[in-house]
Image: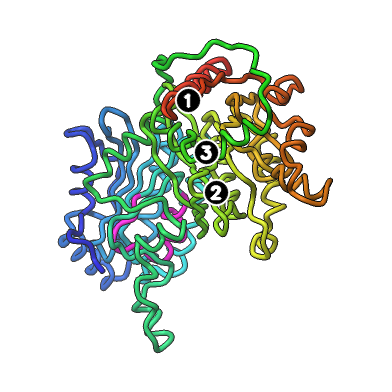
Amino acid sequence: MSPQRRWGAQDLLDLVLDEGSFESWDEPVSTEHHPPAYREALAAAAEKAGTDESVLTGRGRVRGRPVAVVANEFRFLAGSIGVASARRIAAAVRRATAEGLPVLATTASGGTRMQEGTVAFVEMVEISRALMDHRAAGLPYLVHLRHPTTGGVYASWGSLGHVTVAEPEALVGFLGPKVFEALNGRPFPPRVQTAENLAAKGVIDGVVTAEEIPALVDGALAVLVDPPSAPTLERRAAREPRDLPAWDSIAHTRSKDRAGVRELLRYGAEGTLRLRGTDEGERDSTVVVALTRIDGQPCVLVGQDRSRQAPGHEMGPAALREARRGMRLADELGLPLVTVIDTPGAELSQRAEEGAIAGEIARCIATMTTLRVPSVSVILGQGCGGGALALLPAATVVAAEHGWLSPLPPEGASVIVHGDTGHAAEMAAAQQVRARDLLAAGTVHHVVPEVDGEPAADLARAVAAEIGHQLRSAR
C-alpha cells in the first residue's frame, strides 16, 4: 500500500518551496522535564530524523508567493504529535494569521504521541482553534496528506483544509489498521483507508504526488490570493432577446451539442482546480465545484453538469451538499461565487427524499441569499424545478438567450394541467419560461445573445465574457 518514496519533512520543503526561501519559525525544544527513558527516546528520534521534533514550521515561497508551512517528519517517533510539536503548529498558524499568509500543511503521522498521553491529545483542540481563527480571517489552508496519516492528526489539522489532497496509495484513516486488528481480532477491510478510495468517496479532493504539489499550490493561490487580471474575451453587445417560441429554446438546450459548464471552463476560464465531494464522504458528479479564473476574474464556480445527468443518475442531495460546500468556500475566502444552472431537474426517488433533497434545495437558496461576496448566476441551458432554483438567487442573474426556467419540465406541467404530456409546448409558452420573459419580469438582469448554429466554444466564450464583466462591475 505504501507510496514509492517516503518524503522527509526537510526533503519535502526543499522540493516544494522556492530555493533558498525557507525561514524557520521553530524555537528550541526542551526535554528536561520528561522522564529519562523518554528523553533518551527523543534524542534517538532526533538523531534518526535529523530534526528536533516531529514538525518543522516556517515561512517560504512557492513560485514567488509567500506561504507558511507546517511539515510532519515521520521518522521522528512516527510523526506523532506531543505537546511541544502541537504548540509549535498552533504558534505557526497564529503567526501566519497575523502576517496574512496562506498555510500549507503536509502530514505523515500515527497521531497523538502515546508517551505523553492525554495532555498531548487535548492539544489537537488548540491546533484546530488556531486553524479556525485562520480560516475566519479569510486566509487559505491547504493540506497534503502523506503516507501514513492517522489518528488525532487526521482528525484535527489533517481534515480542516479548504483544499485537501493525498499522495498516491497513502494510508489515511482515523484508526490505524494494525490497532484495529489488535483490538477487534480481524483485519480492517482492504483499501478502505487509501487516498484513492477517499477521493472517490468525496472525503478528499484528489490524489497528488509530492512532485505535483508546487503546481497545485501555485494554481490554488492564483485564484485565492492573486488579484484579477485584464479581460481577454470579447463581450457580446446587448440586444433585445428574440421573440422565439419557448419550445425552440427548450429543444436547443436539450441538444447534446449545447455548451455546458465543462465548455465554459474549457474555453472561458483558466487555472481551474476542481474540488471533489462534500469533504464529508459524499460525491456526485452532476455538480462541478472549482476554483478558477473566468476571463481573468478569480472565483468559486458551482455548476450543474448536464452531461452527467441522465435518467437513473439525476442530481441528488449530495450534489447540492457539494454545491453548498462551494458557496461556503466562496463566502469564507472572500471570493466571488458563480453558479451555472443547467439541469433537467433534481432526483425524484425514495433515496432523494430520505437524503433530504427538499431541505438541501432550501439550504442552497438560504446560503446564496445570505452571501457576503459578489455572486453571479448563469442560466446556461435547462433550468428545471427546485434543482435550478437552488443555484438561482445571486446578486446578478445572467441567461443565455435560449436558457429557460420553470417549476417543472414542460411535460410535467402538461400532465398536471391537462392530464397528458401533449401540451408541453403550450405550457412552456404559458408559463413564460424563456430568457426573454425572465428579463421582462426582472428575474434575469442580462441576456447573452446567441447565434444560430454557433459552435459550443463560441457560446461558452460569450457567456464567460459576460460573467467576467459582471464580476468586474461588482467589485
Which residue is labeled 2 in the image?
322
- Disc 1 marks a residue whose amino acid type is Gly
Q: Magenta segment, which residues?
A: 144-160
Magenta-colored stretch includes residue 410: no
Q: Disc 1 on helix, strand or loop?
A: loop
Magenta-colored stretch includes residue 157: yes
**How many C-alpha atoms fall within 10 Å of the one at disc 2: few (<14), some, or many (≥20)?**
many
Q: CA distance from mark 3 to mark 1?
A: 12 Å
Q: Quadrant of the C terminus?
A: top right
Which residue is labeled 1 in the image?
453
Could you tell which of marks 1 and 2 lies nearer the N-terminus?
Answer: 2
- Disc 3 marks a residue whose amino acid type is Ser
Instruction: Return the x and y of residue 364 as percentages of the image width and height.
Output: 66, 43
**How many C-alpha atoms fall within 10 Å of the one at disc 1: few (<14), some, or many (≥20)?**
few
The quadrant in which residue 377 appears is top right
Q: CA distance from mark 1 to mark 2?
A: 34 Å
Could you tell which of marks 2 and 3 lies nearer the N-terminus?
Answer: 3
The tag on residue 60 is: none
Q: Tell which residue pokes out farthest to the bottom in this image.
A: 185
Instruction: Return the x and y of residue 298 as percentages of the image width and height.
Output: 45, 27
**Relative to residue 109, is residue 336 drawn left or right?**
right
In the image shown, does 255 or 73 lie closer to the viewer? 255
- Disc 2 marks a residue whose amino acid type is Glu
In the image shown, does 135 or 38 lie closer to the viewer? 135
Which residue is labeled 3 in the image?
255
Q: Disc 3 on helix, strand or loop?
A: loop
Q: Quadrant of the N terminus?
A: bottom left
Q: Is residue 467 above or below residue 431?
A: above
Question: Which marked residue is nearer to the observer: mark 2 or mark 3?
Answer: 3
Could you tell which of marks 3 and 1 lies nearer the N-terminus?
Answer: 3
